[in-house]
Every structure is written in C-alpha cells, then in structure tokens.
Amino acid sequence: MSNRTYVCSVCGEVRRQPAIYYDRKGKPSRPAPLCHETEMVSLEKGYAEAATKLDAPGRVTWLRSGGLIVQEPGRRWKAAISTREIERARDQLTRHLASQ
C-alpha cells in the first residue's frame, strides 16, 4: 500500500491518490487519475518533493525537459530544468546506477 502523487503533463496540477494496493505482479489496484482526458504521471518520493516546489507552469516545463531531479545536500530534491541541472542530474543517475 502506498500514497501516490500524480502530476498532469498538460496543466501541471498535482493530485494525491491514497491507498493504492498492488497485486503480486506489481500492478496497482486502480488506474492513474485522469486530467485533460489523459492519465496523470505517477511520481516517486524524490520526484514528488521536487514537483511540489514548482508552480503549475514550472511543472509542465520540468516534465517537458525530461522530469529529472538533482539531489541537494541533506537529502533534498530539486527539479532539473536548466541545461546545467539536467547534466548534473544525469551524472547523479549514472553514478547511482553504476553503484548498484
């Protein structure tokens, strides 16, 4: 069971959907909510933290730029929007995947 945070890729609205249960295959018990007749994008913890720090147009820009996040000191997450932040996010992701 988990609470999920969703964001609309069209308008940037953030919505929470509580109590989603997963079956043994990892499928959720209910589909993602709809906004503007499209499924909203599900966000994990760090991504949800980064998205809630942005306004709605900022979230749309962030999603269109790839939806990457940068880990700041102290386990804080920031949305990567600029070219420099996107490169830093990709470097962090590469290092994280290589360490596993």
Image (spheres, helix red, strand yellow):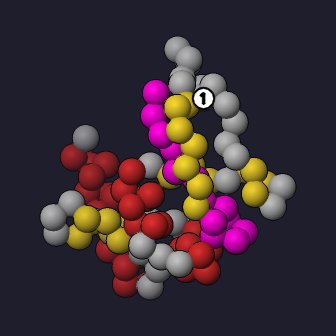
43 lies left or right of 45:
right
Determine the residue positioned at 37% across, 56% down: 46
Q: Residue 87 magenta-drawn?
A: no
Q: Which residue corresponds to mark 1?
A: 28
Q: List x then y, in percent, for residue 50.
A: 40, 66
To which quarter of the image does residue 87 belong? bottom left
Amino acid bearing label 1: Pro
Q: Nearer the viewer, residue 15 or 99?
A: 15
Q: Is residue 64 visible?
A: no
To which quarter of the image does residue 30 belong? top right
Determine the residue positioned at 55% across, 31% down: 20
Q: Residue 5 magenta-drawn?
A: yes
- Mark 1: few, some, or many residues within 10 Å (few <14, many ≥20)? some
Q: Nearer the viewer, residue 71 or 20?
A: 20
77 lies left or right of 62:
left
Determine the residue positioned at 84% across, 55% down: 37
Q: Which residue is farthest right?
A: 37
Count of marks placed on residues: 1
Q: Is residue 69 above or below residue 39?
A: below
Q: List x then y, in percent, for residue 64.
A: 62, 73
Q: List x then y, in percent, for residue 57.
A: 61, 80
42 lies left or right of 80:
right
Determine the residue positioned at 53% across, 38% down: 18
Q: Nearer the viewer, residue 9 or 68?
A: 9
Q: Secondary structure at mark 1?
A: loop
33 lies left or right of 15:
right
Q: Which residues are magenta?
A: 1-13
Q: Is residue 38 visible?
A: yes
